[in-house]
Image (spheres, rainbow, N blue to C red):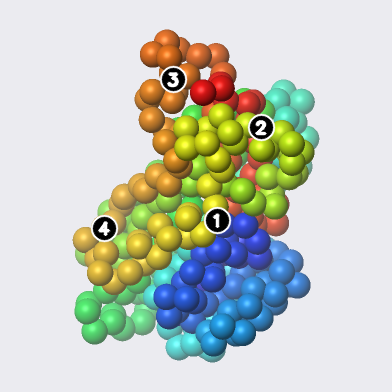
């Protein structure tokens, strides 16, 4: 039994579909109820079981209710994937403070709310036959380690949830709850179109190390790996699925010399709005 936040489109949608394909019953959370219902219909059409759960993850009580609703329907919670995110793009000194705070509320506090509510449920229920209580995946971003301009709130939030997840992994390892982090590269999702035209996306994608944007299904496979009971020895880990974006060679612009250009800046994890992009990376 799994719960995925921000599952209405983009990476979250792919994660919900991949977990259902792997045999999980899935709670599909999104701020927009129609998007959640569409994913549930797709899972049901493929023979799976899913439940739409519209809620704002920035509201802790709402997150507690959606966990309770899922457990009432499916009996327990074995997997929780925090994927919901929001991003507003402006220099910090001119940024709209409402958008700045909304980015923190959804991207950082939303991840914490799901982490806390899911952990409390996993601790309250008996362990599975293999002794494990659950797996939690935090979908983070290269923003956690790269200071991308015009994305201060998002950079802050993603850096915070990486440390949050590592701390949680230490605190619940004895209870056999695993907590891991996933860093997607620049991914082809609807949310990217908030900040870039189609032409801009395709031109910049060609300059990435792998020569294209990631596909959401490629990112989702990393989540399935983390949540597989066979991955029980994996906790507190960070998995990069970024097509070489974090390689030192790439950070030097492929020349061996530092470059002033900045790499792409998104995990495209769609919550109510997905993340954006930075300045174009240097050409190959």
Give the quadrant of the N terminus.
bottom left
Tell me the CA gap for discs 4 and 2. 37 Å
- Judge whether residue 85 can be spotted in this image: no
Q: Nearer the viewer, mark 3 or mark 1?
A: 3
First in residue order: circle 3 vs circle 1 = 1
- The picture places residue 177, in percent across and down from the top left corner, at 31, 66
Q: Give the vertical position of 261 relative to 219 (above or below).
A: above
- Earlier sequence position, callout 2 versus callout 3: 2
Number of the front mark, 3 or 4: 3
Residue at x 22% of width, y 79% of height:
130
According to the picture, the residue beneath numbered tag 2 turns out to be 203
Q: Residues within 10 Å of mark 1 (few under 14, many from 20)?
A: many
Distance between the Cα atoms at labels 2 and 3?
18 Å
Say what secondary structure mark 1 lies in.
helix
On residue 254, the disc is 3
Cα gap from disc 2 to disc 1, whole angstroms: 19 Å
Disc 4 or disc 1, which is closer to the eye? 1
Q: CA distance from mark 3 to mark 4?
A: 32 Å
> Which numbered mark, 2 or 1, is in the foreground of this view?
2
Describe the element under mark 2 as helix, strand or loop.
helix
Q: Are marks 4 and 1 in contact (CB under 8 Å)?
A: no
Q: Which mark is residue 216?
A: 1
The residue pinned by badge 4 equals 234
Other residues around mark 4 within 10 Å, as few (<14) / some (14–19) / many (≥20): some
* Distance from Cα at disc 4 to Cα at disc 1: 22 Å
Residue 93: quarter of image? top right
* Above or below, comparing residue 76 to residue 210 in the picture: below
């Amino acid at each position: 039994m799994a719960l995925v936040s921000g599952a209405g489109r983009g990476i979250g949608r792919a994660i919900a579909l991949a977990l259902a394909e792997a045999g999980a019953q899935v709670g599909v959370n999104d701020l927009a109820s129609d998007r959640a219902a569409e994913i549930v219909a797709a899972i049901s059409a493929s023979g799976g079981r899913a439940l739409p759960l519209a809620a704002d993850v920035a509201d802790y009580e709402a997150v507690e209710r959606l966990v309770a609703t899922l457990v009432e329907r499916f009996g327990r919670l074995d997997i929780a994937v925090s994927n919901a995110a929001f991003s507003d793009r402006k220099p910090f000194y001119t940024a709209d403070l409402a958008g700045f705070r909304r980015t923190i509320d959804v991207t950082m506090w939303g991840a914490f709310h799901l982490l806390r509510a899911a952990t409390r449920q996993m601790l309250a229920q008996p362990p599975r036959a293999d002794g494990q209580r659950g797996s939690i995946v935090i979908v983070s971003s290269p923003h956690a380690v790269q200071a991308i301009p015009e994305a201060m709130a998002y950079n802050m939030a993603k850096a915070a949830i990486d440390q949050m997840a590592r701390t949680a992994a230490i605190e619940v390892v004895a209870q056999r709850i695993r907590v891991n982090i996933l860093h997607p590269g620049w991914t082809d999702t609807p949310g990217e179109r908030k900040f870039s035209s189609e032409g801009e996306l395709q031109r910049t994608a060609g300059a990435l190390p792998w020569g294209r944007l990631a596909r959401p299904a490629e990112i989702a496979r990393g989540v399935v790996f983390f949540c597989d009971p066979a991955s029980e020895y994996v906790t507190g880990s960070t998995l990069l699925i970024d097509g070489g974006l974090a390689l030192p060679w790439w950070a030097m612009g492929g020349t061996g010399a530092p470059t002033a250009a900045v790499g792409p800046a998104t995990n495209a994890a769609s919550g109510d709005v997905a993340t954006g992009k930075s300045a174009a990376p240097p050409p190959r």
